[in-house]
Image (cartoon, grey):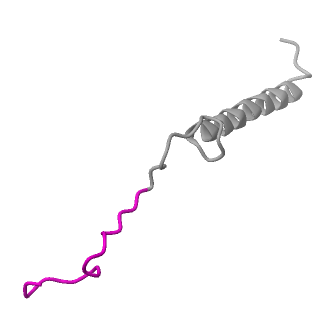
Amino acid sequence: MPPGTIKTEPEGMVPLVTSREPKGPTRAGDPGSIGDQALKDALIIIVAAWAVLFFLGFSLRGFNI
């Protein structure tokens, strides 16, 4: 090893390569997939919209428009 180099891995070993990407293709409905997260977000938005409409209708029930 030339002087001035820093030894970080043992000699003769394959360098460790990590990745956050999935190893293989995942289906849209698998837990933790992008499709699963999008479905959960869509359901939260729909439920929140229905809740807002319900409370708005409940608060305006006395007004005849």
Where residue 55 sits, quadrant-wise, is: top right
Q: Position of residue 12 (x, y in %)?
A: 26, 77
Residue sitting nearer the eye, 26 or 42: 26
- Which residue in the rendered view is the most extreme toward the front? 12
Task: State yes or no: residue 7 in magenta.
Answer: yes
Position of residue 65 measured from the top left corner of the image (x, y, whole percent): 83, 11
User: Which span is picked out in magenta?
Assistant: 1-19
In this picture, residue 8 sits left or right of residue 24 = left
Residue 16 in picture, x, y percent from top left:
35, 68
Main SS of residues in magenta = loop
Residue beneath the point at 40% across and 62% down: 18
Q: Is residue 61 above or below residue 15?
A: above
User: Could you say which quadrant of the image residue 42 lies in?
Assistant: top right
Q: At x 68% / y 34%, what residue is drawn? A: 45
Which residue is painted at 80% across and 33% down in the image? 51
* In the foreground, 60 or 57: 57
Q: Quadrant of the N terminus?
A: bottom left
Residue 28 within the segment the image draws in magenta: no
Residue at point 30%, 75% (across, down): 13
